[in-house]
Structure formats: structure tokens, C-alpha cells
Amino acid sequence: MLKIVGYPDRYSVAPAETIAFKVSLEEGGRFAARLVRVIHGDCNPQGPGLKFRHVPTAADGTYPGRRQRIDAGSYMRAASLPALASGPFTFFAMIWPTLLSRAGMQTLAAQWDPARQSGFRIGVAGGELALTVGDGSGRCVTIRSGRNMLERHWYSVVVALDPAARRVRLDQRPLQPYALIDDQASLQATITVVPAEVSAPLLLAGCPEPDGTVGQHFDGKIDAPALLAGMHMPSSHAALLEAPLPPALVPAVLARWDFSRDIPSTTASDLGPYAHTGELVNLPARGMKGWNWSGEEQAWTRRPQEYGAIHFHHDDLYDAGWETSVALTVPADLPSGPYALHVSCGESDEQATRECYLAFFVRPPRTRTHRGARPDVALLAPTCSYMAYANHAEHITARGAELQMGRLLQFGHADLYMYDHPELAGSLYDKHADGSGVCYSSRLRPVLNFMPRYHSWLGGHGSALYQYNADTHLFAWLEHHGITYDVITDEDLHEEGVDLLGDYRVVVTGTHPEYHSTPMWDAMKTWLDLGGRLMYLGGNGWYWRIAFHRSLPGVIEVRRAEDGIRTWIAEPGEYHHSFNHEYGGLWRRNGRPPNLIGSIGFIAQGFDVSSYYRRAPDADNPRAAFLFHDVPDEKIGDFGLIGGGAAGIELDCLDTVLGSPPNALRLASSEAHSPLMLLVNEEFGVVPPNLGGDTNDRVHADLVFAETPAGGAVFATGSIAWCGSLSHNGYDNNVSRLTLNALRRFLDPAPFPRAALWGRS
């Protein structure tokens, strides 16, 4: 098990800026820290081995440490409401519960003092609408409706309380009744406990706990919550949902939240006269269809009144909120590159890992006046992909993972820690405990698979590296060949656009640049159109469209709409991002296939063994002569640390129908893939009988070169496993030579030919 975990407050930091590291200890009270440059994070003895270069800084030393906890779960806090139990009031809401099997009370609304056990809590307990009141002397009473609700069905719930008269009314009514299903309840009761008046914030979907956290979260959607002064009948609910509000109800309104307002924000607008605006904590899902969704519109911007629901989860998390343990002001002369704060609290053994590497990147200075002369090469670190896969735990939670991988899966200490600590929150590939997809992912938490030495269940036979740690194969190759380069991250590109790329002749990608926002896509396409040279050294790039939050740093959103390799599928009507209202899903479905950027696009995936490329006729084209200098081989990459070959994990190929340039050269194509290398589902309509690489000749990667009209070029490898072959035989192999030949020519300022090499007679 892990005995030390942590995270940085950012993934990209410029010289002279300060980066803060948050560290938690599972044992002991002190830890050591030192800065290292990350060169190679693969401990496979068949490769170069682990390589970290210590970089002495003022951050080196020992520090006090302690266990820091994570308070997961989303809710709304309205701080300005008075003590509601000072008089009679009625709570109204439409709810859509999604995890009624969870034990304990799931809070809908609470004004509660946990220390004195006083106030009230309205919620769902055992599937029934319930109300708990406490008088502060230790006496509490709970009233329940007596009827179970159904999961994923809409209910009108009304709870009226008159403290002085000790009268309670509970009412739950299904929006859609069913024959023989008894889920409607209407209960009037007299309570023996008078709820104490509590001057505290009102919480929706969560309740304060004695230890200072918020718990008893509701899993499900809440739409149109409202509070009225006085005891109101359930019949008032229908009137309360009308627009405009009936005049007879207006004087009684205490609060009336409309979650369809300002959906990209973290505030909940109160349409009532007192403006009790709510603060949304831990990013519950917005842009969700409400109780009245008609299906006539799919975009929340076009009919917002039908998107008044927020989906709360007890396992939502935005910011772990840990205190800073180590702060590092980056030396002004520290070269750009991949770094990590190595923290340790003792010697590791088979039972425990007592060190971890908190990875980050030092980028070039933010202002051009401070940048000075920059190298010609920029490595675009795919931090959006790192965030999308953050704490990816399908191998822990999903059935059939070993069948898909074609092997038994081994759990390391990080995997076991994830299993024991679901509060770390999942990736964009995971589902919440209630079965809904995780559509937001934040980097402000420990991300156990964003670090050197992590072995991924998706990484194939051999080194089993994926995402960040697989990218260290590229870091080491650049180091071995003495290539000076800057690192820029996806977030940098999103924020600064094409201007950030303007300093560089060549941009090199990581192994899996899968997730891109619209500003990122536009910046890369513009830079290419201006003559940039792109070396796409991975696979499955420019696949999913994502959005960044407009005010919260370090969080992205995906909506898995309509098509693509999806571990969960967005609900109909919920295909548009809540952060910026764009239509989500595949870039291909948005009219921008990956082929328009990298010249190739996703065709197949498989996570067992990798294969090799066979030289194609275009390799003999004079335009490709520079690439094949000292590379006479027929087979390319029949070796490697990722699955034993250079073509594996996920593959891309040429397709001019999808936008691959017609002038592109197919230099080589992979072959002899296993039955578990499968054609991706966006490539077929009716399911064909031959999806696997052993029977479907469409399942292959293409090694491609193409010039662009402005004198630039693209070199694309079409495989996530490509970089895992770079180090074979001490970096003396055909994969390494091809890549180095491409980089050397791309660094040459001479423009690539813009006109055909042949003339017309």
C-alpha cells in the first residue's frame, strides 16, 4: 500500500513562479523532498531503467507531514438563509434518485448543527422521503413516508413543517405512475420533538458532519428546489413550477432556485425576493435535463427551462483542498522540461511503497520578452489526456477487463490504494457509484497514474506503461540524442493559443494526445497552416472534444455523445458541455476528424501484444528518402517495451475520406495483429463478423509523411506503442533512426516543397 501521496497545484509552471505541493502521510510524521528531472520512468530491465537527475534547489530537505483527508461529495450551500425552523415552512423539489440502495439518509435539504444534533434534515432514507428533526438536547426523531421510490424516476416531493404546532406533512408523487407500483405517499404526523432554530447555511444534497466534513450526500438529480413560508399543500407544487409564479404564492417565497440559470457557473440563482444565491461545491453535473424535458431540443442553450436539474453524487470531487507541504519557487535559469518532486517517508518494501514522484512540467517564460532564444522543438505534453485518465479504475470496478486485455491483471500498491480510497475520485472513463458517467475530471487531487514508475493495466505486455509514464520513453530518447526542447502543456495551449506555438519550428506530441478543446484544436491547425512541422508520435490523437471551466482552474469536461469508444454513454439530451455549451463527443462527429491535424485517424485498439510495420511502396518515393537514410529494413519495429512491438495499444491509419491529405505518403503499415486488436465502432454500422486484427485488414497502423501547403510537414506514426521501441538496442534501431531522421529534417529551416515534383505536359 502507498504510505505517501500528493499532488502539485498545477501541472505547468514557468521559471520564477512558485508551485505548491500537497502531501499526505499514511504513517510517520516527516518526509524528505528533492527536485528531479524525469528522464525515464520505466523500470523494465529490458530497457534503459529508471533515470532521474537530481536538481538541487531550496526545496530539498525534510518536512513535517500528516495525513490529509478528502471531503468528497457535491452539494449546494446557501449561506444567507435565516433559521427556517423559527416558523412554519414548506420545502418543494423535483428529484430523480439514482442510488437508493446506499445506506443511511441521503440529504435533499438540511439546516443542521451536527455538534448539538439540532435543526432539520430532509432527505431520502431506504428509498422513502424522510424528515429528521433535533432539538439540541440529544433528542431526534425521523418521520418517513412509508413508500419506496424507484431509481431514475422523477418525483415531486413536498415536506411541510410547523415547529410550534409540531405538525409535519410528507408527500411524494411519481411523475409517471405505474400499475401495481405503490410509490406514492402522503403522510401527516405530529412529532414529539420541536426542532431547534439553527442559524447555519442551508445545504442541498449534503449535511454537515461532526468532524467538519459534509456527508449524507444525495445521489441523483434535484430540479427546482424551493422554500415557502407557511404550511402548504402538495397541490401548490404544480403552481410553484409555473412561470410566471401565481400571484397568490409570491408573498410566501423564501427561496426559489433555478438551476437552469448560468449553467457554466458554480452558483445557483435564487429567483426569490431575498436572492439567497447558492454555491455549488465539488462540481455536481450541470446542463442536465430536468423533470420537464420534452426531447424537442438537445441543447440546454436553446431550451434552458428544460435543463433545470443538477446531478449530485457522493463521489464528486473538484479540489482535495489539502494544505501546502512544500513550496518551490522555480529557479529562473531552470531549463524547460519534465520534472517531479520526489517525496519519501522511508524505505519501500513488498508491503508498502514509501515514495512517490509528484510530476509537473517547467514551461518557457509566459511573456515573450522574458523568453529569450528558445529551442526549435516543443514537446506538447498531453495533460488533458492525463487528466481524462486520472485515477482510471475500470480494472478495479468493471467486469471483463482481463478478457479485454488478454492477460491476468496485476494490482500494484497504487491500484490497491485507489480501491481503498474511492474519495480520490475517478477518471472520465469511470462511472460514479450510481452508474452515471464521470463527465468532469480535475487535477487538484492525488492522481496516482500521473507519475513515473506507475504500471498501467492498459499498457500491454512488457513494461505496461500508458499515458504519462509511456511518454517518459520519449523524454529519454530526446535526452539520449541531446535534443534541446521546451515543454508546453495542453492547458498552456488552451490558454495562449497559436501565439504559444509561434516560437517553435517543430512540435512533438506525446504517445496519446487524445483530448483537445476547441482553442487547442484551432491553435494547432492554424500553426500547421502557417508552416509548422508536427511530429505525431502516438495514436488516437485529437479524438474527444473537451471543455475547460471558465473560472475554475484545472478541470475538464467530456460528454460521451453518440459514437466512439465509450465506457459510459451520455444520456440523450445531455450531449452539450455545461462549461461552454459546445456539442461534445468525438471531434469526428463535430466535422473535424483527427486526420485534419495528424494526417491519420483512429482505427483500432487492443491492449495485449504489439506488432510491427512492413515497409510500403511509398517508402521508395524520393520525397521520403531523408526518412529512410540508413533504414533499409523491410520490417520496422518488431521489438519494443510496449507489447513487444512498435504498433500497438491504439492505431491510426490514412483515410482521405476523413481528411487525410491526398499527398500523404504511406511509408509503412502494420500487420499481424492479434484477435484482440479490434476495429473501433465508429468505423462500422452493422457489426461485422471480423473485428479482430487477425481477420480484418483494416486493422493496421500507417506510418505517414505529408507536406503542407505553407512549407511545413507532418510525420505521424499511428501507434501509441511507437515510443516504447525507441530505446531498443541502446537507441540504435530503425524506429529510433526514422524518428531522428524526421526530427533532423524538420529542424532544417528549408521549407518543404509546396508544388508537385512533376509537371504537366
Image: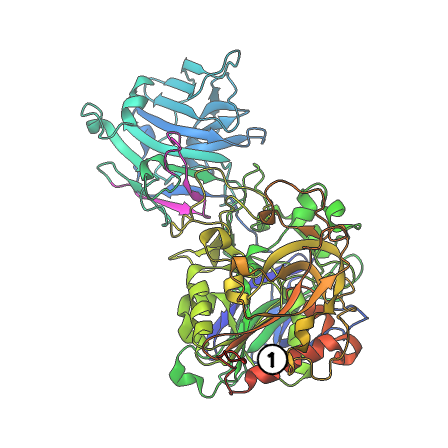
Quarter of the figure with residue 732 = bottom right
Of residues 679 and 477, the one drawn nearer to the viewer in this rendering: 679
Q: Note whether 561 is above or below 735 in the view shown.
A: above
Q: Position of residue 131 (x, y in %)?
A: 44, 24
Of residues 407 and 674, the one drawn nearer to the viewer in this rendering: 674
Q: Note whether 138 is above or below 286 in the view shown.
A: above
Task: Please tell me which residue is depicted at 53% across the width and 11% down the height of the picture.
Answer: 180
Q: Left or right? Give the position of 409 relative to 525.
A: right
Q: Position of residue 492 (x, y in %)?
A: 46, 69
Q: Note whether 679 is above or below 443 in the view shown.
A: above
Residue range corresponding to the magenta coloring = 275-297
The residue at the far front in this view is 761
Q: Which residue is mark 1?
A: 623
Q: Note whether 292 is above or below 760 in the view shown.
A: above
Viewer can see residue 248: yes
Viewer can see residue 55: no
Q: Left or right? Give the position of 306 relative to 355.
A: left
Q: Position of residue 647 (x, y in %)?
A: 71, 64
Indicate how the structure is coloured in the image. Answer: rainbow
> Is 283 inside the magenta-drawn segment?
yes
Task: Please tell me which residue is depicted at 43% across the width and 75% down the height of the picture.
Answer: 500
> Is 265 inside the magenta-drawn segment?
no
Of residues 267 and 578, the one drawn nearer to the viewer in this rendering: 578
Dot 1 amino acid type: Arg
Q: Left or right? Give the position of 318 relative to 679.
A: left
Q: Position of residue 329 (x, y in %)?
A: 50, 77
Q: Residues within 10 Å of mark 1 (few under 14, many from 20)?
A: some
**Secondary structure at numbered mark 1:** helix
Q: Quadrant of the N terminus?
A: bottom right
Label the magenta part by its dominant secondary structure.
loop
